[in-house]
Amino acid sequence: MHNILVPLGTSKHAENTLAYAIAFAARFNSTIYVIDAYPVHSSKATLSNVNTRLQEDNVKRIKGLVTKIASKNQKIKIVSSERDLIGSIRNLNETIGLDLIVTAPLNNEINEAVFLGRIAGSVIKRTHIPVLVAPIEKSFQPPKRMLLAFKTGEVKASSTLKPLISLQDQFKSKLKLLLVKVPGFANRNHQLNDELMQRSEQLLFTENATVYQGVLEHFQANQPDLLVAFKRERGFFEKLWEPDLIYKKDFYCTVPLLVLKNKN
């Protein structure tokens, strides 16, 4: 895991998100790229001076956080871009190859009913890069128990599992699999990836209306300290992120959430 991106907003949680990402990246000797989650851009010439000043202020704010939190030997780079956030991420990914995005569940949202805000929602929905959602006001702790919840165990690209494998190898984490049989479940969904089976200590089954309800049913009993889910092009998460928000009534967890990208 070489390159990790951290989009930072202006909320009070930005410092904690960066500290979490730095502590995580240190375990892999990764390079962190920090980018402004709300880049300022406008086609109106009359606003160019204002935009330039705002961009300078944002970079100054991010540099201040990096200086405050990071140690001298950590590899951290600040990314400036005139594109919107998703365009900037895609461009950076094409240039250097990003292995992971670490983000807070919320940035500037104040609606307490929201679990994942527009920044977290958009990087999950509109990029092909795995995402680690860091809990608010919690420091990084190596995961000892991971729960991977899914409605089909098919993995079409071997690269999909790379982040999960990296975490398990680095932290010697125990992995349990939870196959949720939802309405319309077919026998082919029961076919599980061989490497997942080899790396897991237990396969659990449940029947529920959604993957989330299946997670709720097993969360307390298994007490994972990292929840893992697939984001498929026509899957559970894709339906939730419209428009780029997830409400607590639809999905919520208090532990870090690793979202793997698995194309259908």
Image (spheres, rainbow, N blue to C red):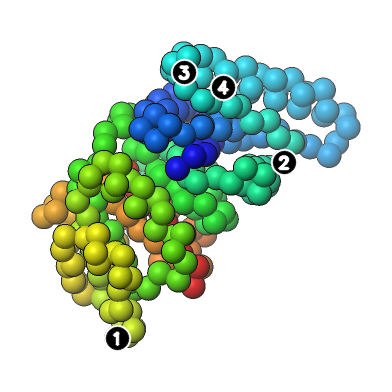
Q: Earlier in the sequence, mark 2 or mark 1?
A: 2
The residue at which mark 4 appears reads as 62
Q: Nearer the viewer, residue 91 or 197?
A: 197
The residue at which mark 3 appears reads as 73
Q: Nearer the viewer, residue 110 or 213?
A: 213
Residue 84 position within the rendered picture, expressed as x and y whole percent measured from the top left: 68, 42
Residue 193 as seen in the image, left or right of residue 176 = right
**Amino acid at the residue labelled 4:** Ile
Check disc 1: other Cα within 10 Å, few if <14, some if 14-19, many if 20+.
Answer: few
Res. 187 mark: 1
Query: How far apart are labels 2 and 1 at the CA level?
Result: 45 Å
Q: Earlier in the sequence, mark 4 or mark 3?
A: 4
Query: How far apart are labels 2 and 3 at the CA level?
Result: 30 Å
Of tags 1 and 4, the one toward the viewer is 1
Q: Residue at x 49, y 43 (%)?
A: 101
Residue 144 position within the rendered picture, expressed as x and y whole percent measured from the top left: 20, 43
Q: Earlier in the sequence, mark 1 or mark 3?
A: 3
The residue at which mark 2 appears reads as 83
Residue 12 as seen in the image, left or right of residue 191 = right
**Amino acid at the residue labelled 3:** Asn
**Amino acid at the residue labelled 1:** Asn
**CB within 8 Å, label 2 to label 1:** no
Q: Earlier in the sequence, mark 2 or mark 4?
A: 4
Q: Secondary structure at mark 1?
A: helix
Q: Residue at x 28, y 48 (%)?
A: 168
Q: Quadrant of residue 251?
A: bottom left
Q: Earlier in the sequence, mark 1 or mark 4?
A: 4
Q: Secondary structure at mark 3?
A: loop
Q: Is residue 258 visible?
A: no
Q: Residue at x 74, y 36 (%)?
A: 82
